[in-house]
């Protein structure tokens, strides 16, 4: 036997038993909360044409995509992100729709990252998209839904950091930076790389006052009380409107009662360049990266022929599970049926008992043993079931320690 076949490739893993039960539990909690806000399920293909994730759209870099060819020679890619697929669906099936569309999805995404990053290459994501709704109320709905969904999973120590891409873009436009330089600067600021950003701005000979504001984004997290001072640092309409949007957003969040979980970071930017306005990330203890990312992408649908605003978010289910584990809040999935041990002469009685349990909605797993003592020696660790019993030929049940 080739023992290497027992191992998975780098970046993917098996999930089974108790861990998988907890994962399904968390997915259900997230899904139930999202449904309460009126979102309907959508399923998109695991792979799409490569152009759905192209550089022009602003999704995952080509070097991080899993690419392959079909028999017709088309270049295909495993999805790294659900949002472009949902945008394609909205443009295809709801081209003439004008009322808001609410979608929710779940499934695996695939990113071919470096092994040195220590990240999984296949993760489970669940998210929601609100399309054809440009209002600040839609922004607040999304952020509040994230808070409610994570709390429903058992996480209470949450921080949602909110930024506004237009604030950054307004300063870049005023400073005369072209798109290529803006993207490089965006990467530096996202990584809080002050020196890289400073060197780039010096190379571009950016005016000192503009450079100071841009460099300030790399290391300054602003609360609501600082939004007014951020407004005073700029004089272009684009950036000023971005601050006003955040101020209005905060007022709506107060109506939801979720404002205490929110802070503002004007240096918050994302690797996905299709984001156009409000952007946010969700954090909790025990995980080194954001467990939720989201934001407004008002131009993405136009790549598929439908000019419509939209906002969405995605929760990385695997990271939520990790956070719950690190915080000693592992979900209790509850009693999950019985293990029924039987000997050759007690099969009929065991089957009768199993059928009774199943009719009442309790799962029952039949396990044959040669004699009574064998079931007492059985290793039940790793079993989902919380209860085990030995069935005797006369129909009586003996409780076993599981």
Image (tube, rainbow, N blue to C red):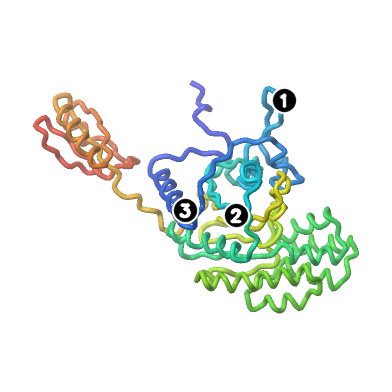
Name the residue: 43% across, 49% down: 28
- The residue where tag 1 is placed is 73
Q: How much space separates mark 2 and mark 1, taking CA atoms?
A: 38 Å
Label 2 Cα neighbours within 10 Å, binned few <14 / some 14-19 / many ≥20: few
Label 3 Cα neighbours within 10 Å, binned few <14 / some 14-19 / many ≥20: some
Name the residue: 27% across, 45% down: 386
Name the residue: 68% across, 53% down: 308
- The residue where tag 2 is placed is 99
Disc 2 versus disc 1: nearer the observer? 2
- Residue 37 location, x and y as percent? 49, 57
Which SS class for mark 1? Answer: loop
Disc 3 versus disc 2: nearer the observer? 2
Residue nearest the viewer, comparing 43 with 117: 43
Judge whether residue 111 can be spotted in this image. no
Label 1 Cα neighbours within 10 Å, binned few <14 / some 14-19 / many ≥20: few
Judged left or right of residue 3, residue 112 is right
- The residue where tag 3 is placed is 35
């Amino acid at each position: 036997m080739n023992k290497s076949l027992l191992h998975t490739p780098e970046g993917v893993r098996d999930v089974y038993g108790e861990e998988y039960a907890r994962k399904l539990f968390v997915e259900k909690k997230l899904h139930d909360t999202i449904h309460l806000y009126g979102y309907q399920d959508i399923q998109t293909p695991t792979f799409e044409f490569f152009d759905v994730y192209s550089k022009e759209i602003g999704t995952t870099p080509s070097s991080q995509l899993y690419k392959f060819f079909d028999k017709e020679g088309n270049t295909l890619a495993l999805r790294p992100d659900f949002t472009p697929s949902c945008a394609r669906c909205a443009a295809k099936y709801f081209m003439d729709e004008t009322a808001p569309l609410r979608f929710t999805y779940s499934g695996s995404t695939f990113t071919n990252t470096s092994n040195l990053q220590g990240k999984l290459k296949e993760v489970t994501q669940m998210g929601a998209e609100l399309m054809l709704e440009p209002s600040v109320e839609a922004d607040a709905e999304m952020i509040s839904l994230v808070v409610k969904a994570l709390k429903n999973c058992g996480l209470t120590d949450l921080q949602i950091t909110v930024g506004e891409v237009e604030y950054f873009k307004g300063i870049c436009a005023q400073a005369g930076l072209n798109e290529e330089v803006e993207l490089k600067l965006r990467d530096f600021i996202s990584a809080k790389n002050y020196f890289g950003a400073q060197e780039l701005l010096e190379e571009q000979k950016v005016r000192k006052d503009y450079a100071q504001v841009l460099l300030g984004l790399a290391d300054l997290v602003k609360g609501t009380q600082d939004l007014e001072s951020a407004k005073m640092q700029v004089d272009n309409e684009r950036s000023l409107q971005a601050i006003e949007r955040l101020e209005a957003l905060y007022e709506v969040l107060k109506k939801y009662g979720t404002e205490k979980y929110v802070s503002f970071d004007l240096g918050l930017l994302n690797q996905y360049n299709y984001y156009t306005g409000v952007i946010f990330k969700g954090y909790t203890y025990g995980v080194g990266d954001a467990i939720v990312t989201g934001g407004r992408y008002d131009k993405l649908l136009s790549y598929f022929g439908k000019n419509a605003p939209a906002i969405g978010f995605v929760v990385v289910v695997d990271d939520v599970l990790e956070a719950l584990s690190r915080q000693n809040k592992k979900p209790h999935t509850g009693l999950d049926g019985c293990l029924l041990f039987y000997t050759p002469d007690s099969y009929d009685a065991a089957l009768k008992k199993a059928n009774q349990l199943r009719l009442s909605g309790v799962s029952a797993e039949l396990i044959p043993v040669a004699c009574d003592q064998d079931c007492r020696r059985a290793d039940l660790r790793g079993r989902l079931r919380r209860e085990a019993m030995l069935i005797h030929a006369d129909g009586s049940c003996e409780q076993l320690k599981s």
